[in-house]
Amino acid sequence: MATKAKPSFEKAISDLEKIVKALESGDLALEKALEKFEAGIKLSRYCTETLDEAEKRISLLTADETGEPVEKPFELDA
């Protein structure tokens, strides 16, 4: 059984936006709306997990010599 490859984060967000627009249109039959809603929930969970993993990686990369995260204010370059 082959496993389905995960979409990129950007693709998942784009697909989620399309689902939201379709649901907001109100033009879908109930069964189709439920299918879209389920797909949207899965994409939302995937995006949340991906962001959580990125946050953990950033915390590891910005840790000081004792392993404690170093928090610095975010500053945009002018």
Image: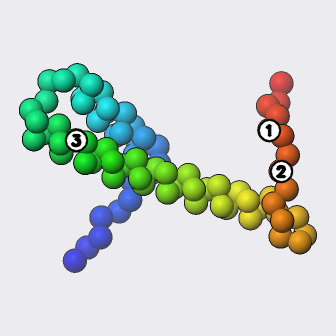
Q: Residue at x 18, y 45 (%)?
A: 35
Residue 4, image x and y in percent?
Answer: 30, 64
> Which residue type carries mark 3?
Lys
Q: Residue tagged by mark 2?
A: 71
Task: Give left or right: position of 22 versus 15.
Answer: left
CB atoms of marks 3 and 2 within 8 Å: no
Circle 1 crowding by C-alpha within 10 Å: few under 14, some 14–19, many from 20? few
Q: Residue at x 46, y 43 (%)?
A: 10
> Which residue type carries mark 2?
Glu
Q: Residue at x 73, y 59 (%)?
A: 59
Q: Residue tagged by mark 1?
A: 74
Of the pair 4 and 68, the residue shown nearer to us: 68
Outermost residue to the bottom: 1
Mark 3 secondary-structure assignment: helix
Q: Which mark is residue 10?
A: none
As displayed, is residue 72 above or below residue 17?
below
Q: Quadrant of the C terminus?
A: top right
Q: Residue at x 29, y 70 (%)?
A: 3
The Cα atoms of the two marked residues, 3 and 2, are separated by 39 Å
Q: Quadrant of the N terminus?
A: bottom left
As displayed, is residue 56 above or below residue 3?
above
As displayed, is residue 26 above or below residue 51?
above
Q: Within the image, what quadrant is residue 18 found in?
A: top left
The earlier-in-sequence mark between 3 and 2 is: 3
Q: Residue tagged by mark 3?
A: 36
Which one is in front in this view, the residue at disc 2 or the one at disc 1? 2
Residue 17, image x and y in percent?
Answer: 37, 33
